[in-house]
Image (spheres, rainbow, N blue to C red):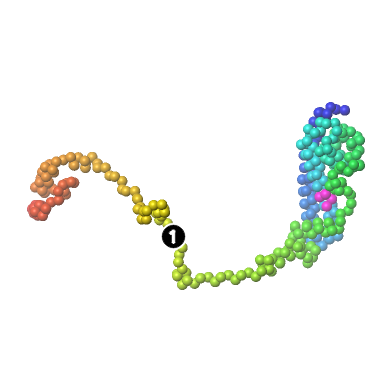
Amino acid sequence: MAPSSSLVSKIKVQLKLAISRLRMVQQKDTAIAKQQRRAMAQLLEVGKEESARIRVENIIRSDISTELLEVLELYCELLLARTGLMEAKECDPGLEEAVKSIIYAAPRTEIKELHQGRQLLVEKYGKDFALEAANNTDGKVAERVVKKLRVEPPDPELVTLYLKEIARTYGIDWPKGQKSPDEEEEDDDEDEPSGGQAVKNLEEPLTTEELVKATPPRDLGPRSPVSVAPPSPSIDNLSPKIRLPGPPELKPGAKLSGLKKQTPGTVAKSDASNVDSGEGKKDVVGGKIPNVDELAKRFAALKK
């Protein structure tokens, strides 16, 4: 007999292979079941109901087998997560259901990786343990596994439900002239909307005169960028002032500052020279305003 640690390692590897294989088989069976359902829909469409009832049993059996493989996959994942409990010689109570269910169901499947994992489990826990699991003498095998492995014809009601579901999925009127409960509920909702209560009449639209008389809301239109907060009760200022930023201060340039430094005498002399020459059409910036006599002299000089 192999040492416990090496045997547990082999079981761990084999469980990973079995999980991968179980998933692949489930995907394959699901794809085949879809094709079979499409074929059943075609038989119902052409009126071959008896043939469809016989063939749909294969679909039911395939679905049960797929569910069994899913359960066994879950048990393999459980054992893989609890491999530390396998180091003991006796089977841990937390693993007993999973181990016995795999030993019981593996020979009834076509998964080779699961068969090899079963052999390793039998080697680990002994032949007596394996016989109890294979015969389910102690009833520790999961009931859902035992139920899915029973070979018995499906109930006629289950067959009818399968055919109805296939017909509804592919939009086929079967049985003829009968509607599904969902379609009947939709028809009832259309006849009596809002749970059978009458819908209230819509209000009449307002006339133009009523709209003109209506007071527009205060929030309508653009808002001013300047807003004044109302005075708080703790202050006496009932009319707060709005403080806006003033214009920027303008600093004089170099020319203007130079003119301001000139004396009044130099400015007067320049004015007199401009008047005599007839070229003083504009006042010097910062000079005095001419009187009426000076203006008359300038016009007389311009006429000459």
Question: Which residue appears at 88% of the width and 53% of the height?
Answer: 153
Residue annotated with mark 1:
221
Locate residue 293 relative to residue 112 in the image: left or right.
left
**Magenta segment, prevailing SS (helix, strand or loop):** helix
| Residue in front for this viewpoint, 152 or 40 | 152
Locate residue 263 relative to residue 99 in the image: left or right.
left
| Residue in front for this viewpoint, 196 or 63 | 196
Per the image, is 253 magenta?
A: no
Q: Position of residue 126 (x, y in %)?
A: 89, 33
Question: Which residue appears at 24% of the width and 41% of the height?
Answer: 253
Whether residue 209 is visible to the viewer of this picture, yes or no, is yes
Question: Which residue appears at 77% of the width and 48% of the height?
Answer: 31
Quadrant of the image containing the N terminus: top right
**Segment tinted magenta in the rendering:** 60-64
| Secondary element type, mark 1 | loop
Name which quarter of the figure residue 167 lies in. bottom right
Q: Position of residue 36 (x, y in %)?
A: 80, 53
Question: Which residue appears at 14% of the width and 48% of the height?
Answer: 288
Locate residue 117 relative to residue 261 in the image: left or right.
right
Placement of 180 over or under 101, stated as above or below:
below
Placement of 180 over or under 108, stated as above or below:
below
Per the image, is 62 magenta?
A: yes
Q: Position of residue 61 (x, y in %)?
A: 84, 50
| Residue in front for this viewpoint, 184 or 228 | 228
Type of residue at label 1?
Gly
Q: Position of residue 94 (x, y in %)?
A: 81, 38
Disc 1 residue crowd, few under 14, some 14–19, many 20+, Cα 10 Å: few
Name which quarter of the figure residue 21 lies in. top right
Placement of 180 over or under 7, stated as above or below:
below
